[in-house]
Image: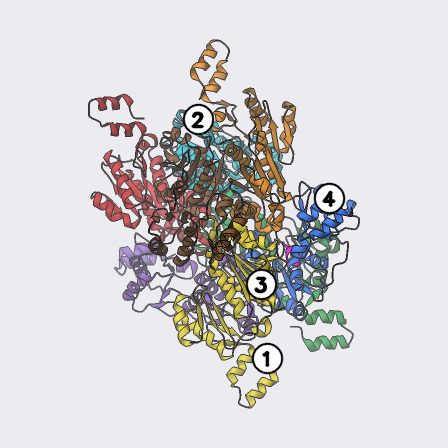
Chain colours: A blue, B purple, C green, D yellow, E red, F cyan, G brown, H orange
Amino acid sequence: MADLRDILARVQSGELSTDEAAVQLQGYEDLGHSRVDHHRAARNGAPEVIFGQGKTPQQMVEIMKSLSARGANVLATRVQDNAIEPILAAFPNATHHALSRLITLQHKAPEPAATKIAVVCAGTSDLPVAEEARITCEFYGNPTLSICDAGVAGLHRLLNSLEEIRACRVVIVVAGMEGALPSVVGGQVSAPVIAVPTSVGYGASFGGVAALLGMLNSCASGVSVVNIDNGFGAGFLANRINRL
Amino acid sequence: MADLRDILARVQSGELSTDEAAVQLQGYEDLGHSRVDHHRAARNGAPEVIFGQGKTPQQMVEIMKSLSARGANVLATRVQDNAIEPILAAFPNATHHALSRLITLQHKAPEPAATKIAVVCAGTSDLPVAEEARITCEFYGNPTLSICDAGVAGLHRLLNSLEEIRACRVVIVVAGMEGALPSVVGGQVSAPVIAVPTSVGYGASFGGVAALLGMLNSCASGVSVVNIDNGFGAGFLANRINRL
Amino acid sequence: MADLRDILARVQSGELSTDEAAVQLQGYEDLGHSRVDHHRAARNGAPEVIFGQGKTPQQMVEIMKSLSARGANVLATRVQDNAIEPILAAFPNATHHALSRLITLQHKAPEPAATKIAVVCAGTSDLPVAEEARITCEFYGNPTLSICDAGVAGLHRLLNSLEEIRACRVVIVVAGMEGALPSVVGGQVSAPVIAVPTSVGYGASFGGVAALLGMLNSCASGVSVVNIDNGFGAGFLANRINRL
Amino acid sequence: MADLRDILARVQSGELSTDEAAVQLQGYEDLGHSRVDHHRAARNGAPEVIFGQGKTPQQMVEIMKSLSARGANVLATRVQDNAIEPILAAFPNATHHALSRLITLQHKAPEPAATKIAVVCAGTSDLPVAEEARITCEFYGNPTLSICDAGVAGLHRLLNSLEEIRACRVVIVVAGMEGALPSVVGGQVSAPVIAVPTSVGYGASFGGVAALLGMLNSCASGVSVVNIDNGFGAGFLANRINRL
Amino acid sequence: MADLRDILARVQSGELSTDEAAVQLQGYEDLGHSRVDHHRAARNGAPEVIFGQGKTPQQMVEIMKSLSARGANVLATRVQDNAIEPILAAFPNATHHALSRLITLQHKAPEPAATKIAVVCAGTSDLPVAEEARITCEFYGNPTLSICDAGVAGLHRLLNSLEEIRACRVVIVVAGMEGALPSVVGGQVSAPVIAVPTSVGYGASFGGVAALLGMLNSCASGVSVVNIDNGFGAGFLANRINRL
Amino acid sequence: MADLRDILARVQSGELSTDEAAVQLQGYEDLGHSRVDHHRAARNGAPEVIFGQGKTPQQMVEIMKSLSARGANVLATRVQDNAIEPILAAFPNATHHALSRLITLQHKAPEPAATKIAVVCAGTSDLPVAEEARITCEFYGNPTLSICDAGVAGLHRLLNSLEEIRACRVVIVVAGMEGALPSVVGGQVSAPVIAVPTSVGYGASFGGVAALLGMLNSCASGVSVVNIDNGFGAGFLANRINRL
Amino acid sequence: MADLRDILARVQSGELSTDEAAVQLQGYEDLGHSRVDHHRAARNGAPEVIFGQGKTPQQMVEIMKSLSARGANVLATRVQDNAIEPILAAFPNATHHALSRLITLQHKAPEPAATKIAVVCAGTSDLPVAEEARITCEFYGNPTLSICDAGVAGLHRLLNSLEEIRACRVVIVVAGMEGALPSVVGGQVSAPVIAVPTSVGYGASFGGVAALLGMLNSCASGVSVVNIDNGFGAGFLANRINRL
Amino acid sequence: MADLRDILARVQSGELSTDEAAVQLQGYEDLGHSRVDHHRAARNGAPEVIFGQGKTPQQMVEIMKSLSARGANVLATRVQDNAIEPILAAFPNATHHALSRLITLQHKAPEPAATKIAVVCAGTSDLPVAEEARITCEFYGNPTLSICDAGVAGLHRLLNSLEEIRACRVVIVVAGMEGALPSVVGGQVSAPVIAVPTSVGYGASFGGVAALLGMLNSCASGVSVVNIDNGFGAGFLANRINRL
């Protein structure tokens, strides 16, 4: 995907090291523990995002360096507690979002989108996941509308905001427990609905399984589902759809 | 629970056979394959109901005879196809309800209840279970309100009937797929809500598990749940509550 | 549900702020993180109850303030340890119930109910859930009968209390492990039985699943089920039924 | 959503029956067994779709009549065998699609979309679900690209068609067994990917659960998931996105 | 386990064929499809029992011949329909027990046991499994006590038979649905209780899983469990214990 | 079960308090949090055993006092860490078994059994559960044979001890991971085999589910199963069988 | 993988059609419903195998023609009943193996392997899966050793054949129910063991899940597992290993 | 397996103690808590490996001493934190591998293998399991090729290393989340592929179940699976295959 002749010319002129040229040609940098995918933006429209869970702080920092060195904006999800300090020390411009466990690092402002994404969440306890979705949307340049605590036990809280929601081009709905909100919203809008089950609940919620199953079986059409607590995935997809 | 002296007096007078006296004293008749519980009405407020699944036609008929012989109204659920003819032959006054697989046999009219039970169901495909609930309610003398196909994908279908539903003393809500309807109804009424998950759906509905979990995790208070497809259980309980 | 003309008149007279009038008209106060439902008592017969799990202490306090400001009695469930102190500091009249993790705050005494609710629990280890149910019943003004450790391994412990239980209008049965107690109680009473499975057990109890399935499959009629460890839900529903 | 004054004027002029006016005002027709939602197109951008499973042939025909009478194009999914003949007899212009179990009835041609939807399926055995998705897309006026049997065991079969797929605005990926295809496709395109797990497989595929879980856990971003075998849902959503 | 010298002497004398001597020495006869275990009675106290499920009629007959040729009484479980006729044709003295799907063939009467085994079952629909247990017990020479339909919804049906049950040395309890009966019985007797969950039920009984879990989590001590519907296993074990 | 006249005579003579007489007549002492079952030994052959999990230290001590006051030997299982010190302080003669989390308190020596119980365990990591079984057996007076680490990956370790095991009257087999040992042992002995699955393992052992399922599906006859990690239950049942 | 210049030369000379050249260059033939992978033998060492489940008879025949036209030996698994006749009509040299549901068609004899593969199965009912494995091994030219009905309930049946098994280079072990055999075999041999769980069993075998979990948790090293009932997969892998 | 006469001769000559002779003859040393299998190398080609989970530090040290005393190289897996120091103190030459939780102790160098094993892992977070596999391979003397972070979301990272991987004789593929990598690799190589699912992921990954199911249902042939996170098992089997 890189322009072969251009790379070679820059190597010849000494503008580009052979190491970097190799990275650009093979499309990734091999750090030993990670193969950082530098062709992803070209293929997928956005650079690689770092999954923080299970990675050491040093691995996190090295991957962020590899991305930053090539000018990519960096988004890290599920950042573990022990990695926050090392990352902020290495990247003073990075921002840690405590509730959503995200770290963002913007080297250049994202291209602003013209249309909005709604992030509707069922209960206050679902906020961490909803925030993960909202911040992801905004990281990619999308304006958002946030509606929190609009669960189906008090429909007027949702219906009161329906016109605002209908004005958005994509709707993310975040809910735990029985996960009924995407069905209700899905029946009221014509935008694509991305449903995010959360692990909020207890007993027979089974860590979000009840909400997940509810959303997969939605009687409303136009609803698709991402993994339990995957606010990032919903935000990423919403950006992709909103950019069409 | 039977009056001991009265029974003995009737035995002495020849009015009562010793066999029947034994049944009344021990509280059940032992048919070998079944111990028909003749004290249940005294304890539970309603005679024993026959669970038709897994019983032979002959067993069904014998149990119905045991109940009928003592004047009890008979309700049989999940009646298997091979038992219908033998039962109707033995009890010409019995009624077979094909959709709900119930058989009813009324020897005396039930005492009419003063207040109504609502049976609200989410989709047309849930009708067999909703009918099982409705007929059970009526078998015990309760007037009912039936609302069918009021699923959450088109809220106005439910909201339009809300006043009627609120006029009922107990509300049964029947739903398959994601089972969201009890939460929505539960948020709108002050009557007890009995939720009945159905096996309607496919794939990740897992034979009604999705709906069951959704209902158990309802964010609306005042909702309790019975087994998947257990329309009878909901109707029985609704009658008990409605009679308070 | 609020009386529109009355609200407007009070705004005109200066008796009511426009902010508060907006809350009363739209039926909820939007705190950003929460939309506190102020129409719930009108719709459901009881004010909104706060689900404590996953909420920050500050969110808890703000929601309690919103409810208290409008005179509603406050019940918070599953209150997390870090929220207890802040809540008690902000509301000196609130009571923390350690075993059941409830916080209650009564601004006015509830209307007393005339009939009793029985709370029967199978084992000593089930007490926290039983207490959650009992305190909820009493929070709403219901007298209760508590029977603890009446599990089926020693039937006489239950049978000895049967007359007392039969004198109650609603029966809550709390059990972990195999969850057999609701079936046995259900076979002995004519009141509605609300079964609460608990997560008490180990191994193949799967955190309460064994008890939950047992209760859903109860061979006794008149039994319905709430979520695992959901003592509050049982108490709330029992109050609703007891008030009929 | 209907224009109130216009409806009333047409009633006054005798142009509209009072029955039909009622349907238009309340937004649905109540057939007893079904409340056919005639506001759905206004709210959701497409008329109600009929879920064929669990409905009697007569119910199917009556719902189709209710929709057809108001000019809506009709799509019925999971049409049961016993309903095909009655439907085709009542609607000679309807088309039955045997492999996908759909029935379509077009009263007016759908507005053609300018951009394509790709339907990529992993194996020949997944075709019925892929066809359900493809026909749904075309029912709503979208041109499609069909790629069949491009499973990951022979990557060149997919890579060879990558340029064609990248030219589409939305990509539906249908796969059973391990359900790996959406991840691989998702890593190669920048369009939204809708993943459809199928029940193709045996043993530990658990009727599509393996594929469903695989897709929910996709390491590729931009992928969302619908229910097992829900080709219709994918096609419906793809149309919605393609129309943005 | 066979007496080596005795076998060799009988081979030498021509009393025993070399083929049969080989079977006796290696402890099994190899039929190609089956290695019939002729040492099992010596090791386990009872000859090999034939698991009928998944075997062809011809395989069944050949295994029965191998066992019969050495004088062993034959018990076949879960006999498939297509095997009944061929077996009865080959072994006119065999008995087919339709309800329990057993075939028995007694070449010599079993040694009678002095003490009884109780087989208590919860509902009429559990009879096939209870019969499998009872016939197995009797096949091995144990007298039995059968109590049917003594489920916990009507305790007096059980309590009335308690003295008879207490007179037995081993108690088998068969129950489907919530499987509560073994706990109740286990709390009333001092004999070992073998619990057999059955697949009787529907919905959340999950083919007997609810009953199985209930029994595994029994709060009564002295209860152990066999596989769902495994009446044979319970009967076999009961015989083993009764013979101690 | 208590001798009524004798109790009354002792009350009359002042030998027995009316409180204690009430306990003996109703068969349990009601401590509020617990109904200690003092008829259990009469019904079940052994006094009530205390399930330590989920009980407060004070509850534990009070229950132990109630049992000790009537001379019963006390066995407490799954004793939580915070209860050990209070119990040992209150009962200096009690013994805490750290590995098995049992506390035993013997007021009188149990009647010694004449025959042995074998406790065979598959791996060193299964020892805590095996010890729970062994100590339970010995608490009730049974001599035991302990064989540890005889898993099927090295059969000679088991076969070498087979004669010793065959000399026992009951065999307990404890195993985690795939739980194959009970099948192998069951094929070699004629004693009843009680299988105890343990939660030893990782990944697809699912906390002992793999072992549990393996044991329930044992191809060897004469094997029954108790709950995961339920060493106590196995020991209790083994004692009951060994006493026959 | 095809030799480009050679293909082009043969096109130029007219020896090769342009259609066939395209197939060879892109590595697959596109039949519309299937993309038959003609590079698989080059990549994987064996031509594509046809998964029969879910394919129409016509699709089966066309795929077999595509493979046969290029000289590949054909193996079809899980061939559905309705496809047998059409396939045998189109390919008179094909062989249908009824028990294992395989169809084989050999255009050229496979290269014979020098070493043997053992196929050991636990019970007679596991034979269909064992046969699928054995025939697959032989289809690829491997000599096999078949041991049937060597389950762990009678160890001598296995131990007697141990020397023969140890003489094989790869060992396939097929077992249902508790699936213990691979652990026992794995502890006795030094060859790689491929474990195949079968769906033989009932109740808590859950269609082979018990055996699958048992095998995944094997305490014996050197054991790996394939899908439930996947005899083909085991045979394919065994051939691959035996060829090393 | 030990040479009987040789052992006896050495006992006679005083070269061998009778204790050690007993160990060698019976094939294991009985430490009370463990029966250390000293015939395993003879049977299985490698000495017993110590499963560290659930063992006390002292047990660990004693088992290592028993193995070391007979010259066996020692590999301990899943070593718990509290055991590390005691082991290193007792065996100064032992090496602790922190990431993979292994301890190795080599008394003699393993025989080097001539061919390589590839260890390919999907993501950086899977490294601990991949390292467990790689170190196991090297412990047994196999050279390895490590490829890390070659997940399917960026195929070029894998394809770029394909030639290196194809040069290996066995391929281990380690992946969490959807576990798709083994299918993709399996479609590109002709070596046996051992798939290792990891517990990396969240939500519907269910601790590795999603990856496990994906791998079991792989559409690529030649793939077998070990337990979740069982890097050791994969390495052990790979060595066995590589040694053929």
- Could you tell me how far apart the alpha carbons at marks 2 and 1 are, in whole angstroms? 83 Å
Chain assignment, label 3: A
Name the residue type under label 3.
Val
Question: Can the viewer see residue G96 in this picture?
Answer: yes
Q: Which residues are magenta?
A: A228-235
Residue B110 rendering spot, x and y as whole percentages: 40, 69
Q: Which mark is residue A137?
A: none
Name the residue type under label 4.
Thr
State yes or no: residue B222 in magenta: no
Residue B77 rendering spot, x and y as whole percentages: 38, 61
Mark 4 sits on what residue?
A18
Q: Is residue E18 above or below residue D240?
A: above
Q: Quadrant of residue E221?
A: top left
Question: Can the viewer see residue E218 in this picture?
Answer: no
Q: Main secondary structure of the magenta part?
A: helix
Chain assignment, label 1: D
Q: Quadrant of residue E31?
A: top left
**Callout 3: SS:** strand
Residue E72 rendering spot, x and y as whole percentages: 26, 35
Task: Count how many numbered circles sit on residues in the image.
Answer: 4
Q: Do the residues indicated by labels 4 and 2 lie within the same chain of the protein? A: no
Mark 2 sits on what residue?
F156
Closer to the camera in the image, C21 or H53 = H53
Mark 3 sits on what residue?
A223
Say whether residue B41 is left or right of residue B216.
left
Chain assignment, label 2: F
Chain assignment, label 4: A
